[in-house]
Image: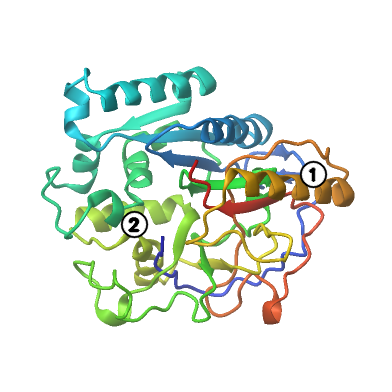
């Protein structure tokens, strides 16, 4: 899915500068395990269905981000049909019930948050079904679940958390996703992917979703992919307040455009197809693309190749099972996190993960 580009100030940073083997965070004096973000992060995985692959990725994410690094992990399960909440005899309602039971058994009752129509309505400030933007709510507002989470559930975060990573259900990863999170600089308020785009977050009226906005002028429209994205908590507060003012836009505009409108303090980092944490096939082709579909057979080959590379580079066990997603960052003003002239940059020693999209099974 295409998404708005973020606009902001440049962030001098090199992916070749990994974090130290261990660091002490002064604000809390906590020792940071190797490969973990300097500050604890939240990681939200969004889904409307539960498959074996997704469930495995959620369990692994909980262990890597929350268990090992002391962060916060939740699965946001979306229920967007009102009749499902009242008609428990329908096959779809029974599937929802089974999905939630499977998630709770694997992650614990606190590990999953079910979000329904009234939750979206109360956060956005309009009745379900009376959508200001034409079209499907869940498509136009693919970033709505994280906004509802911030509005209703953020109080469970620890005091040191500064950012929230969000992944769509079809994002996958190999290795340790926490180490990928740790490869990003702390400062940016918004991190997203520009994929193949040469113009960064810029987008023109030829984009089919360009008209889907209630407040932005034409030259204020930005676009960036958010299959996997990072938001600062202060950006989320601005996002919530703008939404409550009736300022709506297609979800791939949100992060880039809102951060741009608050450009006195909001900064953006982007990463492209040459970023070191983007997974690749045997030909070196990026496998984290908005329009790529990865089959089970392809995934097994990709995961095996990444495991072998990790074992060779980092001494990681070659049999480490694959899982669900992450990304890496680049500056929005043309200083991207990716290879120059189409060449991938080598991974730093602390980055032991690769991200992939899309795994729809």
Q: Residue at x 41, y 56 (%)?
A: 235
Q: Residue at x 60, y 71 (%)?
A: 11
Circle 2 SS class: helix
Q: Which residue is mark 2?
A: 238
Is there any visible trace of residue 25 in the rendered image? no
Q: Which residue is mark 1?
A: 22
Q: Position of residue 286 (x, y in %)?
A: 63, 64
Q: Position of residue 237 (x, y in %)?
A: 35, 51
Q: Residue at x 22, y 19 (%)?
A: 88
Q: Residue at x 63, y 58 (%)?
A: 184
Q: Nearer the viewer, residue 92 or 252?
A: 92
* Residue 31 higher or lower than 168, as above or below: above
* Residue 318 higher or lower than 98, as above or below: below
Is there any visible trace of residue 14 in the rendered image? yes
Left or right of residue 299: residue 96 = left
Q: Position of residue 354 (x, y in %)?
A: 67, 52
């Amino acid at each position: 899915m295409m998404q708005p580009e973020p606009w902001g100030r440049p962030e001098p940073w090199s992916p070749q500068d990994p974090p130290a083997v261990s660091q002490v965070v002064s604000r809390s004096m906590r020792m940071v395990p190797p490969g973990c973000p300097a500050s604890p992060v939240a990681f939200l995985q969004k889904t409307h269905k539960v498959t074996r692959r997704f469930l495995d990725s959620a369990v692994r994410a909980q262990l890597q981000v929350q268990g090992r690094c002391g962060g916060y992990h939740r699965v946001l399960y979306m229920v967007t049909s009102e009749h499902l909440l009242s008609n428990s005899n329908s096959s779809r309602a029974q599937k929802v019930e089974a999905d939630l039971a499977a998630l709770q058994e694997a992650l614990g009752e606190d590990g999953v948050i079910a979000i329904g129509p009234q939750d979206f309505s109360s956060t956005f400030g309009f009745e379900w079904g009376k959508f200001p933007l034409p079209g499907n709510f869940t498509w136009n507002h693919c970033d709505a679940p994280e906004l509802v989470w911030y509005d209703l559930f953020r109080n469970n975060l620890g005091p040191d958390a500064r950012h929230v990573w969000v992944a769509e259900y079809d994002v996958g990863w190999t290795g340790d996703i926490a180490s990928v999170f740790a490869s990003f600089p702390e400062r940016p308020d918004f991190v997203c992917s520009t994929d193949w785009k040469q113009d960064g977050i810029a987008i023109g009226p030829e984009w089919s979703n360009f008209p889907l906005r209630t407040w932005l002028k034409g030259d204020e429209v930005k676009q960036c992919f958010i299959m996997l994205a990072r938001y600062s908590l202060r950006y989320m507060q601005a996002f919530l307040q703008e939404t409550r003012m009736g300022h709506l836009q297609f979800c791939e505009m949100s992060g880039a455009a809102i951060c741009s409108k608050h450009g006195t303090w909001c900064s953006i980092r982007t990463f492209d197809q040459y970023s070191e944490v983007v997974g690749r096939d045997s030909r070196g082709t990026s496998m984290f693309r908005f329009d790529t579909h990865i089959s089970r057979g392809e995934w097994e080959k990709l995961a095996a190749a990444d495991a072998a590379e990790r074992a060779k580079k980092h001494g990681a066990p070659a049999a480490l099972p694959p899982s669900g997603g992450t990304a890496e960052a680049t500056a929005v003003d043309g200083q991207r996190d990716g290879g120059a002239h189409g060449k991938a940059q080598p991974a730093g020693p602390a980055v032991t993960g690769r991200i992939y999209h899309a795994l729809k099974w």
